[in-house]
Amino acid sequence: MNKTKLTLKDVAEQLGVSTATISNAFNRPDQLSKAKREEILARCQKIGYSGPNKAAQILRKGTSNIVALVLADSISYMVSDPVASTFIKGVSSALQENNKHLLLYAGDSDSILDVVDFVDGFICYGQPRNSNLVKELAALTKPVVTVDFDLEKKPSINIDNEEAAYRVAHHALNEGDSIAILGLRLIDSPSTCRIYDSPLIDVESSIAHRRLDGYLKAAEEKNVNVSNDRIWHLPESDRHFARQAAKEVLMSSPRPNVVLCMSDIIALELLHMALEMGIKVPQELKITGFDGIEEAERARPSLTTVCQSSSEKGVQATKALLENLEAKTTLPFELRTGETV
Amino acid sequence: MNKTKLTLKDVAEQLGVSTATISNAFNRPDQLSKAKREEILARCQKIGYSGPNKAAQILRKGTSNIVALVLADSISYMVSDPVASTFIKGVSSALQENNKHLLLYAGDSDSILDVVDFVDGFICYGQPRNSNLVKELAALTKPVVTVDFDLEKKPSINIDNEEAAYRVAHHALNEGDSIAILGLRLIDSPSTCRIYDSPLIDVESSIAHRRLDGYLKAAEEKNVNVSNDRIWHLPESDRHFARQAAKEVLMSSPRPNVVLCMSDIIALELLHMALEMGIKVPQELKITGFDGIEEAERARPSLTTVCQSSSEKGVQATKALLENLEAKTTLPFELRTGETV
DNA sequence: CTGTTAGCGCATTCAC
DNA sequence: GTGAATGCGCTAACAG
């Protein structure tokens, strides 16, 4: 067994052929006879050469088969979120089918530049917490696909968040209702709070504001008043924040009889807390979620929510990236009527 | 704005210095005066050069700052498993602290060779489903750290699975009990079934068999008989399989009054199904889990289980990899007494 | 179908 | 402290 790793050149020498022949045997089957190719491959295997060095190929070819998945937040956080992990699932299975590799990239990193030279492209799931990344992504010439947010002139995958929010709210609301909204990333605050008159962030680009628009439109149609002290901001769709917000909402007076939640995780925490407090759902409190995670279906009472297929988003985003599609895609959603309304 | 990307050479020319100087400014601060360095960095920034091309650096330096995390199974499956995703969390946060990147690698891939040339090392979480990967990993000269299984002469992170299983079983069992065991990957079958006298797989290396040893030791001490038709095999710690197995166990007669489960996911499905069937836990049925996931604590009745810190495993594995530690580490676990025993 | 050659972009000797 | 040369390992273009 050789101590030092074989290079293509060594192998060519050993087999008594030119380097191009070895290279072609591995990369361009059409460039040599099948017999010769197979002979070479067999002999390579025998001497323990498993193919051209990938690092050198990356430099030479300018492609690596690595796709970076930029998450909105730190990997730690994202990976335990059921919605995000379902998305990752979709991406990873589509990548695996195409023999591509998955590099996970945190949205709270400083910069994207330390991988840009060797990845083939970026899938960006949700607007990165660090806005510097947004700028960098927007300026790239390598392929970028965004999901759940948009970048000018880059392909994207979205659902119609405003319409979805409108539909679920419309289903839940009735004239005379007193409502609260548990929103996500509406203002620039690291903690749970009502938005009051804080300046709103990313109003144009964020899906949270689209959803808010949809809720408010439905409320208006039903003559339901929604003031800013009835709208909560949560920094993340996280059980911890959700619990805090749920408590505030349920303790507030007048206690709302309908709460529209921008994620199922939030809605489920609210549901559990309400039940613990002996509040009857839906008789005394109606709840809607958003996303359509499994746990929402299993809950008793089951959650009324908007279903979107996160894994399908992942598959589509991957396809858009690999096939260099240019279009901005809008995926369908579905209203799922549960027992919480 | 330049159309074509700047290379180090271009930049050197533009700034009127040698290529080595630019390179040193970015990589070896000690090789030039602070003033000069800062001037160069500033001018580079101005002309839009963000540093040496990473792909070229990988080839030249032989390191990439990319660490591959090889999962036992497909990424799709692993990422939705709470235990695995907590592990990933630990790894990713430790990597991020060290400015390393995370490449997720599926354990059911054909080979590891298509990334080996450009990653700095491998963390392998659980024995890869494709045994070819095991061979390849074992033969590598690049750093490898294994978790929840061992490779000769490679550092590893484990808990004492046998002792942990023994402890939880010892806590649950009493003389005269009738028990069942819901095990993981004990035999070579893609579906849920009793093991009967099927040939066991990976008896030496698998943690499932260590746990089984622990269970059986406790059973023996308590004079509890366990025949092979009371031991179930599940291919994965997955809700779907768990449900099947739970049903079989609860329908079997005599119905056991203690069920030892090799994961919390399995135990929780069993718990839910038992409650649905009106079986009283723990009066008529005692259940133990393994892992100590959050959901087990939240369940009512709360689950008696073995807690191991998966995120700590991730951190330790990363540290072992990055610091080239050689040791095989055994991490502590903790018995968590819940209400299901 | 095969062999030769010129870089891909850089880091690191070594002389100065 | 700086600048010129070599090669990391490979692929693509071309000539034969």
Image: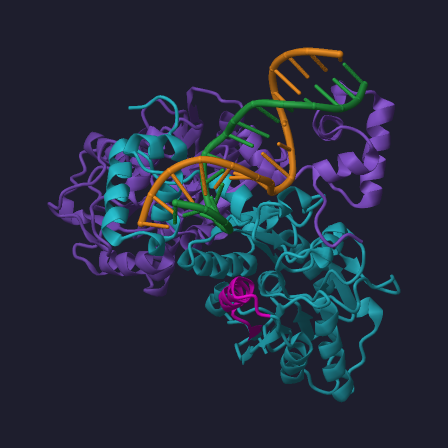
Chain colours: A purple, B cyan, C green, D orange
Q: Is residue A200 left or right of residue B240?
A: left
Residue A210 in the image, given as x and y percentages of width and height = 28, 33
Asked if residue A65 is positioned above or below residue B141 in the image, the reply reads above
Question: Does residue B212 belong to the magenta stretch?
Answer: no
Q: How many discs mark residues in the rendered view? A: 0
Residue B154 in the image, given as x and y percentages of width and height = 67, 66
Q: Residue at x 58, y 45 (%)?
A: B118
Asked if residue A61 is positioned above or below residue B276 in the image, the reply reads above
Residue A216, quarter of picture: top left
Q: Residue at x 51, y 71 (%)?
A: B301
Q: Nearer the viewer, residue D9 or C4?
A: C4
Q: Nearer the viewer, residue A245 or B10?
A: B10
Residue A226 in the image, given as x and y percentages of width and height = 17, 41
Q: Which residues are magenta?
A: B306-325
Q: Nearer the viewer, residue A81 or A294?
A: A81
Question: Does residue B318 belong to the magenta stretch?
Answer: yes
